[in-house]
DNA sequence: GTTTTATCTTGCCAAATGACAAGAATTGTA
DNA sequence: TACAATTCTTGTCATTTGGCAAGATAAAAC
């Protein structure tokens, strides 16, 4: 069980659950290795796996109304990665989930997670809190998108996820920030010339 | 139970639950009437009520980093209204939830909803699906905020919630769209002069 | 009904961002 | 290594949006 230490700690830090029950939970997770550029989920398919990312970097993206590739999120270690909508509604996904680097994760299938939800009240409480947490994060990003300039969002990204600049193309980071790669190039050029 | 018809139908349309169990659920909801301008939740307090809005219009807003009042959402009939983060984490809310008109709703307290979650599996499944649904809606708005112009977002709002122009000030709608009231005034002036 | 206050519009100008195209730099591949 | 394909940068110019201030309009208070 030692190999699932980060998974164990992740659950422990996000809910009040006894170690015995956490062990009971984590033993249902199966290892999943993904190679750089591989898809964990492709648009049009149904998301069947909840994945806890132990190591690596992941980008999710969709095609918007104009057919443009828009990065919806970046993920790194110790984060859950899945399309909640497709997973819980059993509907086809609009999202693509792609590995930016080789990744190692731990997965639960839809059926397994549902069984655990029904049999372990603490785990479903954990599941709900995770969902609410993601919801909050998204709300923050929403507010940031509506009230901050692209440059401010860029500086925040540097703070929160500096590694991503090493693994993602600037073009894909630009779409995450909601701007064109052209504007992004200029913003990066000027951002540190100004006082903040 | 006839007075809870819209609540009944709302649950029925969002999950697969027998009528008997829905009746078991809805009987725990209590009526709540709110007058125009009253607060259902104020920033700094803990959200203790899950409310299903049967009639009326509601605005939620927060104060951003610069202390500006920013509208985070509008709600109208047949929508759940609460601050999920504050409600489930038992944390103080940043959101203000205020009635734009006299409202009638049905509420569940935190304790009641938790009891129901534990005793009625179908209801907690309903709860999860509601949460995921809101999550999707927020994702859509996020995408819209990042990829569309303010004018496009304005036209979408007219489609989805035309009534709101009757009940909210333009200033508050502007902040919902992520622009100033000045820009909004110009956009409204020009929006219908152009072909779309 | 008049005054006060808040909201909305408009003008002027500046800043932020986009569209497009041409190079430069980088990466992948034969 | 050399060719091809991407990605990134830069220039030019247009569009979108913001900031500020002055009026106009509407709503609230007295």
Image: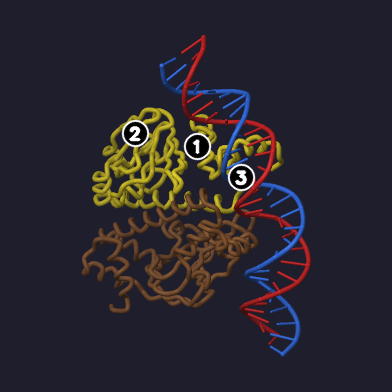
Chain colours: A brown, B yellow, C red, D blue
Res B153 quadrant in image: top right
Q: Secondary structure at mark 3?
A: helix
For the point 62% across and 64% down, the residue is: A185
Q: Tell me the subunit letter for badge 1.
A: B
Q: Is residue C29 above or below residue A28?
A: below
Specify whether disc 2 shares its chain with disc 1: yes
Residue A45's label in the rendered image is none
Earlier sequence position, callout 2 versus callout 1: 2
Res D24 quadrant in image: top right
Specify whether disc 2 shares its chain with disc 3: yes
Residue A73: x and y in percent read: 49, 62
Residue B98: x and y in percent read: 39, 35
Residue B152's label in the rendered image is 3
Q: Could you tell me if the residues under marks 3 and 1 are in contact, i.e. CB atoms within 8 Å?
A: no
Residue A97: x and y in percent read: 50, 66
Query: CA gap, disc 2 to disc 3?
Result: 37 Å
Q: Tell me the subunit letter for badge 3.
A: B
Q: Which residue is mark 2?
A: B4
Q: Secondary structure at mark 1?
A: helix
Q: Tell me the subunit letter for badge 2.
A: B
Q: Is residue B107 above or below residue B128?
A: above
Query: CA gap, disc 2 to disc 1?
Result: 32 Å
CA neighbours of label 2 inside 10 A, class few (<14), some (14 to 19), many (20+): some
Which one is in front in this view, the residue at disc 2 or the one at disc 1? 1
């Amino acid at each position: 069980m030692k190999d699932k230490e980060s998974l164990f700690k992740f659950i422990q830090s996000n809910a009040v659950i006894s170690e015995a029950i956490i062990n009971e939970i984590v033993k249902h997770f199966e290892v999943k290795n993904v190679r750089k550029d591989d898809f964990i989920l492709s648009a049009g398919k149904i998301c069947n796996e909840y994945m806890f990312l132990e190591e690596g970097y992941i980008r999710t993206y969709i095609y918007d109304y104009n057919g443009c590739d828009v990065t919806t999120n970046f993920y790194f270690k110790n984060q859950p990665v899945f399309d909640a909508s497709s997973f819980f509604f059993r509907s086809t996904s609009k999202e693509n989930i792609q590995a930016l680097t080789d990744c190692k994760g731990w997965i639960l299938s839809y059926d397994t997670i549902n069984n655990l939800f029904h049999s372990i009240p603490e785990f479903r409480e954990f599941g709900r809190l995770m969902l609410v947490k993601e919801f909050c994060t998204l709300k923050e990003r929403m507010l940031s998108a509506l009230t901050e300039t692209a440059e401010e969002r860029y500086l925040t990204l540097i703070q929160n996820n500096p590694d991503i600049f090493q693994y993602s193309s600037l073009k894909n980071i630009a779409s995450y920030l909601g701007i064109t790669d052209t504007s992004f190039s200029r913003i990066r050029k000027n951002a540190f010339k100004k006082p903040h």
